[in-house]
Amino acid sequence: MSLRNIGHRLYQGEVSFDFVGKRKIWYSISAVIVLVAAIGLAMGLHLGIEFKGGSVYTVHKPGLSVSQAKDTANKITNSNTALVQTTDKGDVRIQISAEESVSATTFTKEFSQAVGVDEKDINAQVIGPSWGADISKKALTGLIIFMVLVTVYLAIAFEWRMAVAALVALIHDLLITIGVYALVGFEVTPGTVIGFLTILGYSLYDTVVVFDTVKENTRGLTKQSRRTYSEAANHGLNQTLVRSINTTVVALLPVSALLFIGGGLLGAGTLNDISLALFIGLAAGAYSSICVATPLLAQLKEQTPEMKALAKRVAQRRASEAKAAEEAAERGEDVMIDEEVPAGMVGQRNQPTSRTRGKGRPSGKR
């Protein structure tokens, strides 16, 4: 069966996965992941030199290897914290944290003597922690403004419950991404911050697409008694499921290439900063829009008086139809299949309802 055919059947309601009905499972999974992420955050983030300050030395010497430069730098600082990379011009870039009490002049002199290079071929740049603090403050301010604007927009375009659900999903994605960053020990750089802010837009886009379909499916819902809000929302989620999966896979392919091929196989460590944040964030965003945002929205809506009354009417109708169907079966009458059973109810499309041929009508049996 092709993916296109599956998408069509999901859209028509012929096939359905009960994401909303199994929200307790998704909540439990999210709670475990967030807990692990919180443990990672408690261990602390590996902040880059841009945030904690330090010195950057660019050494121009053909034939100087990364391992040689790293060993020499660690001997000078009496530590094992030097971060050494090659640049696109073939130079060697050495980062020394501000925690190491070695002046730029001393490091340049000793390093030049150790590897046999002129001091003029070593470019030293000292970065103060105030620069990183300023960047962090601006990033946090931008994040808060973004969250506020998103909440206001969703509250106006949809409703406040959708805004709350989307906001919870965004925070969920951020916590997981930052927690994974802390656990794997990747360095947090300005590129990482850009990656964090990028995934917020993606996560929000995916959630809004689902919410828009849910809004269409639940318009005038209280005027009928065949499906509850959760079932209608679950149907909308299934209608956009294939689209969400396709979008996520297409987005993850280039990011995976950057992370695993560029950063892993080719050793371009600078790509890891933004690629890991994007990879984890995109995956978490797809998960949260399907398994967190929509189930949470349905849970909030089901608490309203009108939806409680609707759920009660739906339950009464189904009980009445089931009783009528049972009585018809006892009389030997054929039972008609109600094709309007809510699409969100997995595996129940072929269940009998109360539509019978009526008393006195021939059943077709002899």
Image (cartoon, helix red, strand yellow):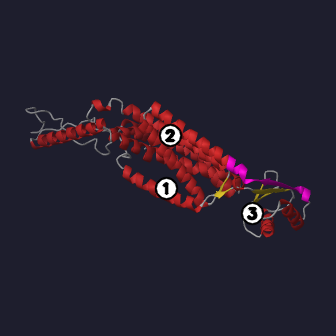
Residues shaded magenta:
119-134
Using the numbered discs, state the Cα–Cα distance from disc 2 to disc 3 in whole angstroms: 40 Å
Q: Which residue is mark 2?
A: 206
Q: Residue 314 in the image: x percent, y percent?
A: 24, 38
Image side of residue 65 versus residue 329, left or right: right
Q: Residue 145 in the image: x percent, y percent?
A: 57, 39
Quadrant position of residue 48 = bottom right
Residue projecting furthest to the left? 360
Confirm or deny contact between disc 2 and disc 1 (CB under 8 A).
Answer: no
**Tag 2: amino acid:** Asp
At x 36%, y 44%, the residue is 299
Which is in the foreground here, disc 2 or disc 1? 1
**Tag 1: amino acid:** Val
Mark carried by residue 82: 3
Rendered position, 338 above or below 175: above
Question: Which circle's residue, 2 or 3, is located before the other in the chain?
Answer: 3
Q: Is residue 97 shown in magenta? A: no
Using the numbered discs, state the Cα–Cα distance from disc 3 to disc 1 in whole angstroms: 32 Å
Q: Name the one closer to the observer, 27 or 76.
A: 76
**Tag 3: amino acid:** Ala
At x 64%, y 46%, the residue is 137
Mark 2, residues whose alpha carbon is within 10 Å: few (<14), some, or many (≥20)?
many
Q: Give the SS element for disc 2.
A: helix
Q: Give the SS element for disc 3.
A: loop
Q: Which residue is mark 1?
A: 34
Image side of residue 145 versus residue 292, left or right: right
Q: Name the one closer to the observer, 300 or 15.
A: 300
Q: Residue 256 in the image: x percent, y percent?
A: 61, 50
Using the numbered discs, state the Cα–Cα distance from disc 2 to disc 1 in whole angstroms: 20 Å
Mark 1, residues whose alpha carbon is within 10 Å: few (<14), some, or many (≥20)?
many
Q: Residue 39 in the image: x percent, y percent?
A: 53, 61
